[in-house]
Image (cartoon, rainbow, N blue to C red):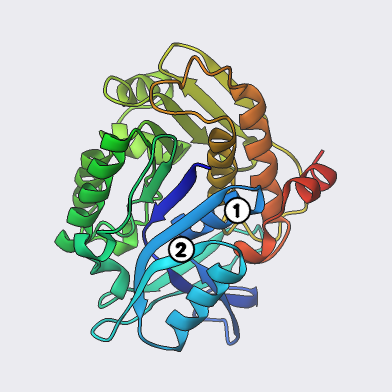
Amino acid sequence: MSKLYSIGELLIDFQSVGTGSIKETSQFIKNAGGAPANVCVQAVKLGAQAVYLTKVGDDGFGEFLIQTLKDEGVGVSFISKSREYDTSLAFVSFREDGEREFSFYRRACADLHFRPEDFADVNFERGDVLEYGSVALKTDDARDTHKSLIEKAQKAGALICFDPNLRFNLWESREELKETVNEFLKHAHIIKVGLDELEFITGESGQNAVNKMFGGKLKLLLVTDGGKGAYLYCADGRSFSCKGYRVKTVDTTGAGDSFFGAFIAQLLDAKITPDTVFDAGADYEKMLDFACKCGAYTTAGYGAIPAMGNRENVEKAVK
């Protein structure tokens, strides 16, 4: 059975109790976080096999994160512990509309200092998926590790999936972030990006922005627009849209990750490879719709991983 391998940050989300700014908040609840990790968990909840690739601090936070992923059914054999660096932390507060304010503690974190040799025993097969984001691309070590795994995955015939997941306050400049994202866009067969992120990355809007993304390896471009739904643009000229689903939103944390994890799980189920994206009979309109349902379902609960659902729960709750 083909597997999803995700690489990236694994961190503690300290989420505020009640609404207000981080300055105003006095109580926080601890949850596991990290976008690629969230993607893994959602895929597993939908029946996929997934493995997470990262490094955490040799501390109680790191142990909690490893145990959380293990309990969710994600493979953790390639998560190592560092005595030199700490586990990443993020504090999140909520506005009345469910949107968030972040404060990250990642200046000396383990998930920016993994190296290619940490994953030397990772072996991809045709039909596997390698997924990553931009948050863990800040250091030379991390970038080299991503490039090494991408090369191995490409040679094996695996799908490469990228979610830029832009976090501007983690970078010295927007120019540095844009340069790094564009360097790693070129490797991906499938990209998931928010509408505002698409405009930042391309410097264009509308169809011009979409067109600018194609031309290399990219086969499928997923563009999300929050509660308004999502779009799927294909390299063969087709496009699909979903208007989204109305739910009682309490927390948007992990909605995009749930969406992407659900889409990837369906790619794995359909046995899609880079060579069969357009000739394997995949119903991309249906896949987009279900991914939107999963994203909406996650916003109805607090946290990312705790709020994600399996197929039965999602289909029952989101109409």
Asked whether residue 316 is in view, the answer is: yes
**Image position of 222 with respect to 59: above or below:** above
Asked whether residue 247 is in view, the answer is: no
| Secondary structure state at the residue bearing disc 1 | helix
Residue 36, horizontal then vertical, whole percent: 45, 55
Q: Amino acid at mark 1?
A: Val
Residue assigned mark 1:
44
Residue 40, horizontal then vertical, whole percent: 52, 54
Residue 291, horizontal then vertical, whole percent: 63, 39
Q: Amino acid at mark 2?
A: Gly
Residue assigned mark 2:
34
In this rendering, the label closer to the viewer, 2 or 1: 1
Q: Looking at the image, is mark 2 or mark 1 earlier in the sequence? A: 2
Residue at 23% x, 84% y is: 84
User: 285 or 151, which lies in front?
Assistant: 151
Residue at 39% x, 26% y is: 274
Residue at 59% x, 67% y is: 94
Residue 57, horizontal then vertical, whole percent: 35, 81
Q: Residue furthest top?
A: 237
| Mark 2: few/some/many CA within 10 Å (<14, 14-19, 20+) | many
User: 211 or 69, which lies in front?
Assistant: 69
User: 242 or 156, which lies in front?
Assistant: 156
| Secondary structure state at the residue bearing disc 2 | loop
CA–CA distance in space, label 2 to label 1: 16 Å
**Image position of 16 with respect to 295: above or below:** below
**Image position of 262 with respect to 9: above or below:** above
**Image position of 250 with respect to 194: above or below:** below
| Mark 1: few/some/many CA within 10 Å (<14, 14-19, 20+) | many
When asked about the image quadrant of residue 86, the answer is bottom left
